[in-house]
Amino acid sequence: MRKPSDLSALGGRAVLPFREAIKSEVTLDVYQTRLTLFLKWAYLTADELVTGAKANPTRIQDLITSYMLVQKERVRKGEISPRRDHVPSCQLPWS
């Protein structure tokens, strides 16, 4: 997964609970990267996403659905891998 060098879209108050809820640094890194890529695609900041979701939840839901469909198409075309950044939550000793 390409990592955005600019995480400025994650500034503001809306992202604080998001960051605080995630204990694992690895998980936080992956989630922040994915959220930043979505926000850049949508030309939004995290605060604008939250404000928009409160004002017009259907619009934001449609935006997220559109993004997911674009990503699924990219997987279908082989442009991206669906699990390239997968990090298992735990590894059992016998698996």
Image (tube, helix red, strand yellow):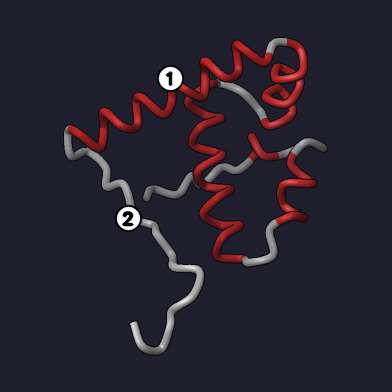
Sequence-first disc among 2 and 1: 1
| Residue furthest out toward the bottom | 93
Residue carrying label 1: 66
Is 83 drawn above or below residue 53 in the view shown?
below
| Residue occupying the point 45% across, 49% down | 3
Residue type, mark 2 in image: Arg
Residue type, mark 1 in image: Ser
Residue carrying label 2: 84
Quarter of the figure with residue 20: bottom right
Measured as percent of width and height from the top left, residue 75 is found at 25, 37
Q: CA distance from mark 2 to mark 1?
A: 21 Å
Is 29 drawn above or below residue 63 in the view shown?
below
Question: Quadrant location of the C terminus?
Answer: bottom left
* SS at circle 2: loop
Residue in front for this viewpoint, 10 or 59: 59
Is 45 drawn above or below residue 25 in the view shown?
above
66 left or right, relative to 79: right
| Residue occupying the point 82% across, 37% down | 13
28 left or right, relative to 69: right
Residue in front for this viewpoint, 71 or 88: 88
Other-residue count near label 2 (Cα within 10 Å), few / some / many at <14 / 14–19 / ≥20: few
| Residue occupying the point 60% across, 18% down | 60
Quarter of the figure with residue 52: top right
